[in-house]
Image: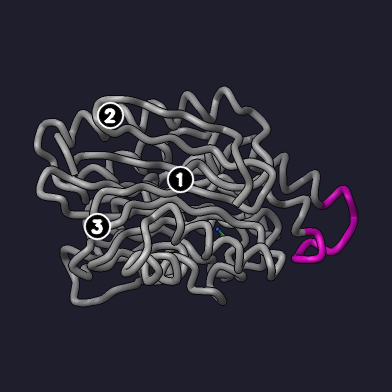
Amino acid sequence: MRGSPIGIICHGGAGTINDKQAAAEGLEEAIGQSYRLLRQSADAMQAVVAAVRIMEDNPVFNCGTGSNLTVEGRAEMDAAVMTQDGRFGGVCCITDVKNPILVAEKVMTETDHLLLCGSGAVSFAHKLGFEEFDVITERSRRRLEKLRQDGKSPYFPKLEKMMNSGTVGAVAIDKHVKLAVATSSGGITGRLPGRIGDSAIMGAGTYAGPSGAVSCTGHGELVIKMMLAKDIVERMKTLPASIAVTLGLSEAKRKKGMCGAVGFDARGGLCFGHTTKDMAYGYMVADRLFMFTKGKKG
Ligand code: GLY
């Protein structure tokens, strides 16, 4: 790899993007700020957490503020972080905090555990000083209301209509050529309470290992079954990132999975792809920003 190895790639979710400009602006802000941190010698973990935190605070994305609601109208969120050397922290079905990704990072740095869920995750966050925060927006309420008005089964038979998922993720490579990944999601509108998606499951929506790091988005159940992030990272052992992601997503497509992924391999090769109509994503390498809200299907 020539020149500065640093880089950041982010996605703002696979599915149908209703407001492409807002998604692009939100991604650009997250990528720009995170890249600046990398330029100032931040490590890859600091960079991905910063990027995801910015997207969690932006109601255009389905994570943190603006998260999709369960069938009972609650915002139960999933988030996780992982480093290339195997450190991991995650929260599942966490409620009433502004930034699940910061709590996930604390699970990694402050506990001997990997994953906290539900009320345990909430009380851990509050004990650490994270304030109570209502992430529910009018827009997320309207999405649930619309689903209810359609009068069909509120759960997976309607999955295609629910694919405005907007889960976010970031993968960074720092100046020491170390990788980290962070993913955060508000889940799928109208899901059952207590449902856990792929974002906080190690190997499913979030994975980093010696050969690379990947964040996934899309239909969580399929992504978990495929262990999609790990599948792609494993392929990076012998293949460039771009081919690894294409092969991983081809398998997802064969299973009719609606999903997408972004990542870096350990040599600094980046990758992105999706099987859905759209995916919002962008990256910055060698001081150049590239933005996509729609692209070639994986
Ligand atoms: N990919 C996010 C979810 O299924 O919850």
Q: Earlier in the sequence, mark 3 or mark 2?
A: 2
Q: Residue at x 30, y 56 (%)?
A: 265
- In front: label 3 or label 2: 3
Q: Which mark is residue 254?
A: none
Residue under the point 19% across and 71% down: 111
Q: Quadrant of the N terminus?
A: top left
Task: Tell me if residue 221 can be seen.
Answer: yes
- What amino acid type is highlighted by mark number 3? Ala
Q: Position of residue 87 (x, y in %)?
A: 21, 68
> Distance between the Cα atoms at labels 1 and 2?
18 Å
Give the mark nearer the N terminus: 1 vs 2: 2
Q: Against 84, is 56 above or below? A: above
- Seen at 88% across and 50% down, the residue is 150
Q: Is residue 198 magenta?
A: no
Quarter occupied by residue 62: top right
Classify residue 112 by image quadrant: bottom left
Q: In front of the other: label 3 or label 1?
A: 3
Residue 33: assigned label: 2
First to last magenta residue range: 148-158
- The type of residue carrying mark 1 is Gly
Q: Residue beneath label 3, please? A: 266
Secondary structure, mark 3, is loop
- How many callouts does the rendering have? 3
Gap in angstroms between the C-alphas marked 3 and 2: 23 Å
Residue that numbered label 1 is attached to: 64
Q: Position of residue 245 (x, y in %)?
A: 47, 58
- Tag in front: 1 or 2: 2
Magenta stretch contains residue 150: yes
